[in-house]
Image: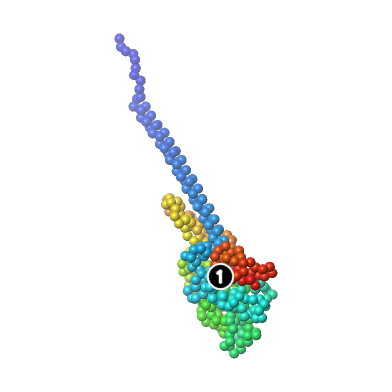
Amino acid sequence: MNSTSFKHGFTLIELMIAITLGMMIVMVATAGVRLAAQTMTKCNRMSLENSLVRAAVIQACDEVDFWTMLDHPSDTKMQSLRKTANDGGWQPFAPFSVSKILASETAPNFTRVEPERVLTWESSPMAWAAHDARTWCRANLVECAGTDLRYGDYSLFSFDRPQNNLPTYDPSRCRNWYANQVRHAFDGLGFYGALEYLPSSALLVYHGTSPASGGPSGISKGKMPKALLNGQGWLGLKFQAFSLGRFRMTDSSVIPMPNPAVNILPQNNGTKDPFRVSWRVGYAGKYVNDGAVEAVKFHQATAFGGALMELQPQSWPDVSVKVERLIRQSRAVAICIIDITDPVTGSTTTIPFSTRGTSFRGARQQRSTIGDGWATYDNVQGPSKPVIGESFDNERNITY
């Protein structure tokens, strides 16, 4: 008799289908695991990047308040702005105690018989009271290099120092104080520092010799330094000729806090000193010959800062923090720039923002062991606290 039993198994087609389906399942599972891993890696990288950006924002805001990238009180390698500039003037963070231009006489005294003879810088607000006749500018505001002085020689009444060699000089009529304050602010602090320290309504003018640094060395017929006459030197446009105030000086020009490590100066600026020159940023065409600079070069020349961390894993993003400071249209601006570079793609993302913090005057006053200063500064030592009813000058540690 023949057997009627059958042997069961996969046919070749069934086997091929099963293998294909199995491979597809494995591939899908592998892709899912890989995608999950990449997602976790990306999330971790984004979390790390966000943490670094937060730290960079905090550091930038701290820098706006404390100015340690420009002048670090405890790191002598980061105190380059306490030296003299190229042409002899002092840089912005030079202490008043070592800046001979600003400390050429003993401490001022408001009770002295001749307060106009004060040669030192007086930063106390009491010294700049509007009712004080010393703050009244005695200058011919339309004077230019070619004037014939038909309206009088105003220089006879306002010199930055006594002019005993002039036959018409009269010490009883000469008013030195205002000219000294303006002169000392420019020579001792530079343009940016001068505009921070001088009152916003001050006229940037004085009669006397040429500035210690920067600009043409000529003197007009009215004994006005040509460097301070618009159209003759540093200050602004060339088609006008008159003395400037803070707003007019920064109307079409920018006054920055320059980085001496990147010495990029505008064309036709008449000086080798970056601290005593005005900038025209972003102008093109005919204004290029008037000292205009490209915005890229301007940012390079005014940015302070560097890497967020000195040492870090190679797989981490590179983050840098920079802060630029400038005065435009009479307003002090702090621009913070954060750059994040991806270590995988090499692409860089820039996050710029502006904020407000401590002024330049406040930054210098922070660097004092007297009063409320938090850092050591080599100014002259004085009383620990001001007496009620008196004015305390925290810059020079003097009680008035």
Neighbourhood count class around disc 1 (C-alpha, 10 Å): few under 14, some 14–19, many 20 upward: many
Quick one: which residue is furthest to the bottom in this view?
Answer: 167
Disc 1 secondary structure class:
loop
Question: Which residue is nearer to you in this view: 379 or 18?
Answer: 379
Up the image or down, 151 lies above or below 247; here it is: below
Whether residue 23 is visible, yes or no, is: yes
The image shows residue 351 at horizontal and vertical percentages of: 52, 56
Query: In the image, what residue occupies the spot 50% across and 52% down?
Result: 52
Q: Is residue 246 left or right of residue 265?
A: right
The residue that mark 1 highlights is 379
The image shows residue 318 at horizontal and vertical percentages of: 45, 54
Whether residue 154 is visible, yes or no, is: no
Q: Quadrant of the N terminus?
A: top left
Query: In the image, what residue occupies the spot 41% across and 33% down?
Result: 25
Residue type, mark 1 in image: Asn
Question: Which residue is nearer to you in this view: 49 or 122?
Answer: 122
The image shows residue 388 at horizontal and vertical percentages of: 68, 68
